Image (spheres, rainbow, N blue to C red):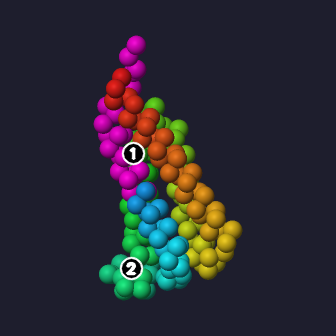
Amino acid sequence: MEIQHSSSPKVAIGLSFCALAMLYSVMLVGVYISSSNQGLSCTEWPLCPNGFGLPSEKHFFEHYHRVMVVITAGFIFATAAYSFKKFKPARKTAIIAAIVVSVQIIFGMLVVTTRLEPLLVASHLSTGILLFAMTLMTFLASYKLRFQ
């Protein structure tokens, strides 16, 4: 039995893999920031003191964490848009991931503006795990069709 879908899974595989790889990288940098007590190295939001310029050594990881988030969110939104229009097997998890990344960005902002409120930090970290799960499921839904 052949599964019918309106387009090749290659685009969905590429987008969802890039989103997943970037998200994993963002999470690694975020864990480093947290574990090295650099969570308040950059108290301005959304940009650090140098704006879009090269960050100082003090703001390096926090600045690049935020830059990576923007790129990752772009891949997650692109995957959701593509799945919504052209790739039904990954549609549900891709749309959930797009919603969750939006919530995650708001949590990230609140973590900074409340100066590391513990409940918000825990929410930010746990929402990141949910986001990773949805992004992984989107990738797996895309990838499995490669073999059918």
Asked whether 14 falls inside the magenta stretch, the response is yes
**Residue at position x 38%, y 16% in the image:** 2
**Residue at position x 35%, y 78% in the image:** 52
> Residue 57 location, x and y as percent?
37, 85
Kind of residue indicated by mark 1:
Ser
Dot 1 crowding, Cα within 10 Å, few <14, some 14–19, many 20+? many
**Which label belongs to residue 94?**
none
> Residue 135 location, x and y as percent?
47, 47
Q: Is residue 119 above or below residue 36?
A: above
Circles 2 and 1 in contact, beta carbons < 8 Å:
no
Location of mark 2 (residue): 60
**Residue at position x 62%, y 69% in the image:** 121
Dot 2 crowding, Cα within 10 Å, few <14, some 14–19, many 20+? some
Look at the image and give the residue range highlighted in magenta: 1-23
Kind of residue indicated by mark 2:
Phe
Q: Nearer the viewer, residue 31 or 131?
A: 31
* Relative side of 20 to 120, left or right: left
* Relative side of 35 to 123, left or right: left
Q: Quadrant of the N terminus?
A: top left
Q: Quadrant of the C terminus?
A: top left
Q: Secondary structure at mark 1?
A: helix
Snapshot quadrant of residue 102: bottom right
> Residue 88 location, x and y as percent?
45, 32
Q: Is residue 18 above or below residue 12?
A: below
Say if residue 114 shows up in the picture: yes
| Extreme residue toward the front, this view | 35
Earlier sequence position, callout 2 versus callout 1: 1
Q: Nearer the viewer, residue 82 or 57?
A: 57
Magenta stretch: helix, strand or loop mostly: helix
Say if residue 51 shows up in the picture: no
In this rendering, the label closer to the viewer, 2 or 1: 2
